[in-house]
Image: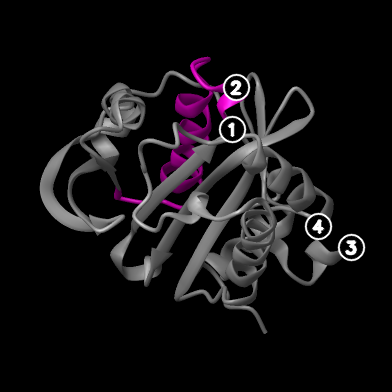
């Protein structure tokens, strides 16, 4: 199995409604279709890099290549756990978790997107809770950070529900305009107080070296 040679591919997160895992090629085909189904109102742009502004062909190809590139660039010092979100046996989005020098810093960042047809059903909260459980319970993280444009009310709502605290403001350029981004931080203590989603982790132990913990890969 390919996970014997790249153990992060064997990590599975399960919640009451979802499974999260790094994608196979067939998962990426479904992910591309999910993206083509629409991710947000075209009149707004919730992402710093406006990847959803591309035409259908470039958009689908970009989704696939981005995830391939993420796996190809993985090192124990700089990794990104880009997990497809599976709901009712269909891939409906991505929940990522990334870190640099995690063995020392013990901090992760997260980002995500979800196809519009399943938005508004609490899936965004459940999938972020899953990777936070991996971070804090599985990997021993001390902090998690995230950000959202001030117009991204759904993302901000998820952060608040899960116990994040405001952590500053920055301004970025999106579609040629100045946009205000709100930063949020979740400490290990606040995570413990706001755990409401049960999460099971499978296949983590063989992958710990790839996350910068335990014995490094040979």
Q: Are marks 4 and 3 in contact (CB under 8 Å)?
A: no
Q: Nearer the viewer, residue 113 or 56?
A: 56
Q: Is residue 97 left or right of residue 153?
A: right
Q: Is residue 181 above or below residue 70?
A: above
Residue 207: x and y, percent? Answer: 64, 62
Residue 84: x and y, percent? Answer: 65, 44
Residue 18: x and y, percent? Answer: 65, 27
Q: Which mark is residue 115?
A: 1
Q: Nearer the viewer, mark 1 or mark 3?
A: 1
Sequence-first tag of 4 and 1 = 4
Q: Nearer the viewer, residue 42 or 121?
A: 42
> Could you tell me which secondary element the residue under label 3 belongs to?
loop
Q: Is residue 3 above or below residue 77?
A: above
Q: Which mark is residue 192?
A: none
Is residue 22 at all visible to an observer of this figure?
yes
**Which corner quadrant of the image does residue 81 belong to?**
bottom right
The residue that appears at 40% across and 63% down in the rendered structure is 99
Residue furthest right in the image: 1
Q: Nearer the viewer, residue 186 or 124?
A: 124
Is residue 201 at all visible to an observer of this figure?
no
Query: Separation of disc 4 and disc 1 at Cα?
Result: 19 Å
Q: Quadrant of the C terminus?
A: bottom right
Q: Check the image and tell me how it is coloured.
A: one colour
- Magenta-drawn stretch contains 140: yes
Q: Which residues fall within the magenta stretch?
A: 116-145
Query: According to the image, label 2 marks what residue?
Result: 118
Q: Nearer the viewer, mark 3 or mark 2?
A: 2
Q: Is residue 56 above or below residue 91?
A: below
Query: According to the image, label 3 marks what residue?
Result: 1
Sequence-first tag of 4 and 2 = 4
Query: Separation of disc 4 and disc 2 at Cα?
Result: 22 Å
Query: Separation of disc 4 and disc 3 at Cα?
Result: 14 Å
């Amino acid at each position: 199995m390919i996970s014997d040679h790249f153990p992060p591919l064997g990590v599975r997160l399960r919640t009451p409604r979802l499974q999260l895992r790094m994608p196979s090629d067939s998962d990426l085909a479904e992910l591309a279709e999910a993206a083509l189904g629409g991710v947000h109102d075209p009149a707004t742009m919730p992402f710093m890099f406006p990847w959803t502004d591309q035409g259908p062909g470039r958009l689908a190809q970009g989704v696939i290549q981005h995830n391939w590139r993420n796996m190809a660039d993985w090192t124990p010092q700089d990794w990104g756990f880009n997990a497809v979100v599976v709901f009712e046996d269909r891939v409906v989005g991505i929940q990522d978790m990334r870190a640099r020098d995690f063995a020392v810093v013990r901090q992760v960042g997260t980002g995500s997107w979800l196809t519009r047809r399943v938005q508004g059903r609490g899936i965004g909260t459940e999938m972020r809770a899953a990777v936070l459980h991996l971070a804090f319970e599985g990997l021993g993280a001390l902090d998690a950070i995230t950000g959202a444009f001030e117009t991204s009310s759904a993302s901000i709502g998820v952060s608040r529900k899960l116990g994040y605290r405001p952590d500053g403001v920055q301004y970025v350029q999106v579609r040629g305009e100045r946009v205000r981004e709100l930063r949020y931080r979740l400490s290990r203590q606040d995570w413990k107080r706001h755990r409401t989603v049960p999460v099971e982790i499978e296949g983590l132990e063989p992958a710990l070296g790839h996350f910068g913990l335990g014995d490094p890969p040979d």
